[in-house]
Image: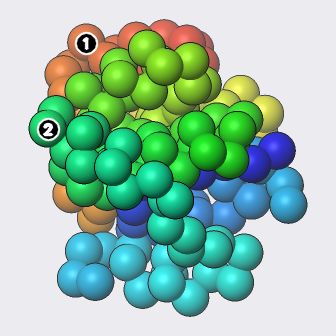
């Protein structure tokens, strides 16, 4: 399955030493985790082929999110990895399957790749400087895996 990821998801997972979860889930800078992302041999950087569409999406999103969505569409990706709410909504509107950093961790907890979602979310907030948009989302994710 082709998965196209925005850097925020890669860097967030890398910051808590969980980048390999993406390899398990989808076989085949200065922020914490950026070095591990650059050095992962199974991650390939690729630009979107339609700069006009990227420019159009830039009216609503940042450049990385716009590129990610366009590339995912061009590659008919099975999933696009995005965290920012507006980018996720736009991707879903055009028919892309979306998963974020927390979604990857929820999956990992369900299949036994990690022992505790709570521990990983705390690490993501601390070491990764990742901010969940609300306590409600955090609580919902914890309930989904039985850690409420």
Taking depth in this image into account, of 34 and 88 the one nearest to the observer is 88
- Give the labeled residue for mark 1: 136
Question: Which residue shows up at 47% across the image and 44% down it?
Answer: 70
Q: Which mark is residue 81?
A: none
Q: Could you tell me which secondary element the residue under label 2 belongs to?
A: loop
Question: Which residue shows up at 69% across the image and 41% down it?
Answer: 77
Q: Which quadrant of the view contains residue 80? A: top right
Q: Which mark is residue 59?
A: 2
Question: Which residue shows up at 25% across the image and 39% down it?
Answer: 56
Question: Which residue shows up at 53% across the image and 32% down it?
Answer: 99
Taking depth in this image into account, of 31 and 106 the one nearest to the observer is 31
| Image position of 75 with respect to 34: above or below | above
Residue 7 located left or right of residue 31: right
Q: Earlier in the sequence, mark 1 or mark 2?
A: 2
Residue 73 located left or right of residue 28: left
Residue 139 located left or right of residue 19: left
In percent of width and height, residue 113 lies at: 73, 46
């Amino acid at each position: 399955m082709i998965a196209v990821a925005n850097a925020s998801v890669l860097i967030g997972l890398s910051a808590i030493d969980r980048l390999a979860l993406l390899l398990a889930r989808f076989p085949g800078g200065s922020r914490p985790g950026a070095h591990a992302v650059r050095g992962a041999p199974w991650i390939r950087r690729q630009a979107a082929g339609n700069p006009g569409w990227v420019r159009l999406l830039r009216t609503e999103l940042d450049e990385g999110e716009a590129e990610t969505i366009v590339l995912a569409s061009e590659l008919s990706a099975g999933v696009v990895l995005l965290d920012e709410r507006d980018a996720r909504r736009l991707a879903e509107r055009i028919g892309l399957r979306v998963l974020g950093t927390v979604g990857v961790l929820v999956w990992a907890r369900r299949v036994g790749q990690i022992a505790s979602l709570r521990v990983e979310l705390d690490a993501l907030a601390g070491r990764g400087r990742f901010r969940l948009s609300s306590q409600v989302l955090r609580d919902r994710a914890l309930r989904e895996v039985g850690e409420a």
